[in-house]
Amino acid sequence: MKNILERMAEHPLIFDGAMGTMIYSKGVFINTCYEHLCVTSPKLIAGIHQDYADAGADVIETNTFGANRLKLQGHGLADQLEAINRAAVKLAREAAGDDALVAGSIGPILKSGQIFLGNQAEELAEIYREQMSILVDEGIDFFMLETFTHLEEAQLAAREAQAFGIPVFVSMTFSKEGETAKGRKIEQIIQALENDSNVDGIGLNCGVGPAAAYSNAERALPLTTKPLVIMANAGLPQEVDGRMIYMASPEYFTEYAKRMIELGARGVGGCCGTTPADIGTAAKSIKAMTGVKQHVTIASHTQQEAPTVDVIPMAEKCAFAAKLSRGEKVTSIEITPPRSIDLKPMLDKCRICKDAGIDAINIPDGPRASARISPMVAALAVEREIGIETVLHYCCRDRNLIGMQSDLLGGYAGGLRNYLIITGDPPKLGDYPDSTAVFDVDAVGLTQVVTNLNHGLDVGGNRIDPPTGILIGVGANPCAVEPKRELQHYMNKINAGAEYAITQPIFDPEALLRFMDAADAQGGSIPVVAGVWPLVSLRNAEFLANEVPGVEIPDAILERMSHAKTKEDGRKLGIEIAREISDAISDRVAGYQVSAPFGMVELALQVLE
């Protein structure tokens, strides 16, 4: 099995959640030595480990946080130190199985309010060595030194741990202000751990909920090249019937866990208050993310014995492609397929757009992971009955490679020429949280599949004659949380064969221009169609800003929308802002893809007037 550092280099990992919270929820009194339960109630501890493993955790931590001689002495259990630590590793290993890693959990000896004194060093080192030697002898995969507040103690423990020859992670606790209990700032701590050769990975855990942990991660990540693990509490506890209960939902925890991965964290898990429900929800969404899921590798047509075929030039694929090739501005309106079998209302809106001279209808594929009438059926009906071209979104979530290839070939045979290739939202974000996602490939892989079809080869290397002539569009997110990663992902799509891009809704023109400049500098000069969204109210703006992945709305726009006193004022102001944004980027973009909020195509058309 690869070690923790090798696995993290490949993709981020999911750590388990709270142990103490789960033990307490089983009715065990707080004054009990929780580590001793590994010996006295092994089924209880094993069950908690198994719940986390079943939830999708890649790392199971041993129940040994306070299983050192000094802490156990307080419970009169110092003589059972070896039995407790050995039992703890065995229980964690059994739950971890062959796939998950086992982390030896070691907590601090000093309390947060104590002062670290130099003359304590040898005594502390001896206590740590004693516990560590047992954990290593029993077969842990790496050390997780966690919830430390004293940098000097953490570094002392790391020095002792490094001597055992397995990876060492040091996780510190900070307040929402990014300070330790003694007031030392996160920047100072992270810099010290970055320069410490005994530390292989860094962690932030406990003390704060997901939002504050994310803010601290934003400060920490730029300061280290070592993998960062973030294990937040489940929000702030509230007293309910005498118990401290963490009120944050698994969905709330998951949203921030995803953002932490997007920011660059190489591991996320839970601390106080988190449960298998939190870890399970997070694991489901995160493991479907690009850069995390292990996708099927799609070989380029240039790496195979490609048949000699007449590849259709971009300008000859469809009218939309022809305008892009000539450098003329293209326009499209996004209209979502209905949640019914009645296509007439959608077709009526498409007819209005055609009469207004719009070039294409943009048709999303299960937006926000919701089930609607098949977007491909809708696209075929629009092209057949209205006579306007469609840009069909096609996502990787719901179909395996065989099904996707069949759809692409069938859609092309039916007359569909223009696809926007996207990865798609994980099911947990939508109406069917228990459904599963496929994600055989992400948008990069599917782009390569379509490029191969355009060159006469299917995913198995079999000849497709005649080849398809699909115009390959891809998504772009200029306001991504981690710009460098998004730019690289965008360049990978271009290298896989993307011919143009449509962006997420743009509310910050400068962000788009910076993104395009960065792409141009790397040779990524494909036509970019800007996404434009006419806001209708402050509430609509706040929803987009807070709930829709990839959409960033500057505070200045939110403040402007707050001045709208009526529904009519909100729509008028939203159109005004959309026009201003369109004008600001007009000389750089190849056209506009305007959303029709709540299906109101008249608002989208007013933006383009």
Image (cartoon, helix red, strand yellow):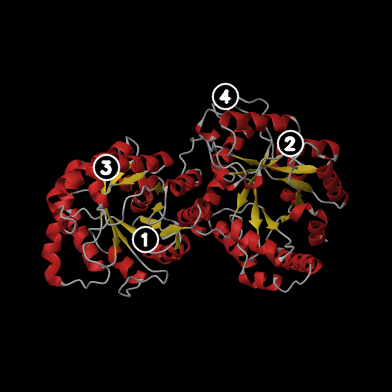
Disc 4 versus disc 3: distance between alpha carbons? Answer: 59 Å
Q: Going from the N terminus, do you reach mark 1 or mark 4 first?
A: 1
**Amino acid at pointer 2:** Leu
Please tell me how many numbered marks the rendered image carries.
Answer: 4
| Secondary structure of residue under mark 2 | loop
Disc 1 versus disc 3: distance between alpha carbons? Answer: 26 Å
Residue 136 seen: no
Q: Which residue is mark 3?
A: 41
Circle 4 packing at 10 Å, graded few (<14), some (14-19), many (20+), is few
Q: Which residue is mark 1?
A: 206
Residue 449 in percent (x, y) is at: 58, 35
Circle 2 packing at 10 Å, graded few (<14), some (14-19), many (20+), is many
Foreground label between 4 and 3: 3
The residue under the point 63% across, 51% down is: 526
Q: Going from the N terminus, do you reach mark 1 or mark 2 first?
A: 1
Foreground label between 1 and 2: 1
Observer-nearest of 424 and 51: 51
Circle 1 packing at 10 Å, graded few (<14), some (14-19), many (20+), is many
| Secondary structure of residue under mark 1 | loop
Q: Check if mark 2's residue and mark 3's residue have beta carbons within 8 Å.
A: no
Q: Which residue is mark 2?
A: 416
Foreground label between 1 and 3: 3
Q: Which mark is residue 462?
A: 4
**Amino acid at pointer 4:** Asn
Q: Going from the N terminus, do you reach mark 2 or mark 4 first?
A: 2
